[in-house]
Image (cartoon, rainbow, N blue to C red):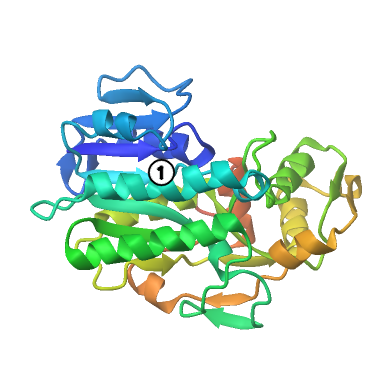
Amino acid sequence: MRVMVTGANGFVGRQLVMRLLEAGEVRGRPIEALLILDRQLDGLPDDARLRRHYGSVTDPALLRRALADGVDVVFHLASLPGGAAEAQYELGYQVNLQGSLELLDQLRNPRRPPVLVYASSVAVYGGDLPLRMDEDQPCSPQLSYAAHKRMVEIALQDLARRGEVDGRALRLPGIVARPREPNGLRSAFMSDLLHAYAAGEAYTCPVSPQASAWWMSARCCVDNLLHAAELQAPGDRRVWQLPVLQLTIAQVLAGLQASLGEETRACISFEPEPQLEALFGRYPALRTTQARKLGFCHDGSVLGLLRNALDLPPRRGTAATRKGICA
């Protein structure tokens, strides 16, 4: 089994690579080669199965070299985040759209279509969402990043219909807790809030306590990516909205207080930015019946989310969350 991860040096990509190496198999077959592609590939283990490919997904020649010996499963995570893609349209177009379409084209194989798991985004829905919604909510992208994600979803569905790529796209919510460093994500406040509270540092939150977002830990995200690759007969639908935890900032703070204590709560202040809150603080309750039937999951509760996101020990009297399984 030959497996590829693009964006392997990213927040989710690194965790996915480590889980693949630990598991040692995908779809019931041992991993003989794990092809990892990114501009930098630092700090990963010295493992004979790793094949490092340095560069950008926008380089067709690099993709050809990486795929020269064939591939069975691809996890396509490489992207330019939403805020950065909006500020640098040309670069976002090259990475998020052209690079993804080039990868899809090079993967086409009607005799033995490879499995492709694509990291899409809830950004495809845009703003002005209803009070309650489900998986059939129409898309209305309001950022270039979101528009490009939707375009790739359509291309993936088309190649799956043609039997040339066994594509599966997952619409990811806000994934936490990302490292506290510039990353171009306009939703970075979700992770920054968790880190600041855990460290007892002052933090000014750019959305109000009533702002509601969709949350998922990186650990649970990796679980879902791996589960998508394992599906044997996904059917005609190839784009799924993952189950999410819909939580307000106030609920997350209450969970942090319950998990870590209230001593640092006074360090959190609020200066809401109306445009940011309109895009990332008005997410409604979400019903994901079809995704749940297929076995996709969320972190279970706000406390489960925080345990997974911040690597907190389980609360006394509760069973530990099994590694690699959503709480």
Can you give x and y, in whole percent of width and height, for residue 137 in the image? 51, 79
Q: Nearer the viewer, residue 71 or 46?
A: 71
Name the quarter where the N terminus is drawn: top left
Q: Is residue 124 above or below residue 34?
A: below
Residue at the location (48% across, 48% down)?
A: 96
Q: Residue furthest left?
A: 111
Left-right relation of 247 to 65: right
Q: Residue furthest top?
A: 46
Residues packed near mark 1 inside 10 Å, few (<14), some (14 to 19) or many (20 plus): many
Q: Is residue 37 above or below residue 186?
A: above
Q: Which residue is mark 1?
A: 99
Quarter-of-image position of residue 4: top left
Can you give x and y, in whole percent of width and height, for residue 89 in the image? 60, 47
Residue at the location (17% across, 47% down)?
A: 28
Q: Nearer the viewer, residue 147 or 74?
A: 147
Is residue 173 visible in the rendered image? The answer is no
Can you give x and y, in whole percent of width and height, for residue 269 in the image? 90, 51
Count of marks, rendered view:
1
Is residue 108 visible in the rendered image? The answer is yes
Residue at the location (66% across, 71% down)?
A: 127
Q: Nearer the viewer, residue 93 or 235?
A: 93
Q: Amino acid at mark 1?
A: Gly
Q: Secondary structure at mark 1?
A: helix
Can you give x and y, in whole percent of width and height, for residue 147 in the image? 53, 61
Q: Residue furthest front?
A: 90
Quarter-of-image position of residue 146: bottom right
Residue at the location (46% across, 34% down)?
A: 14
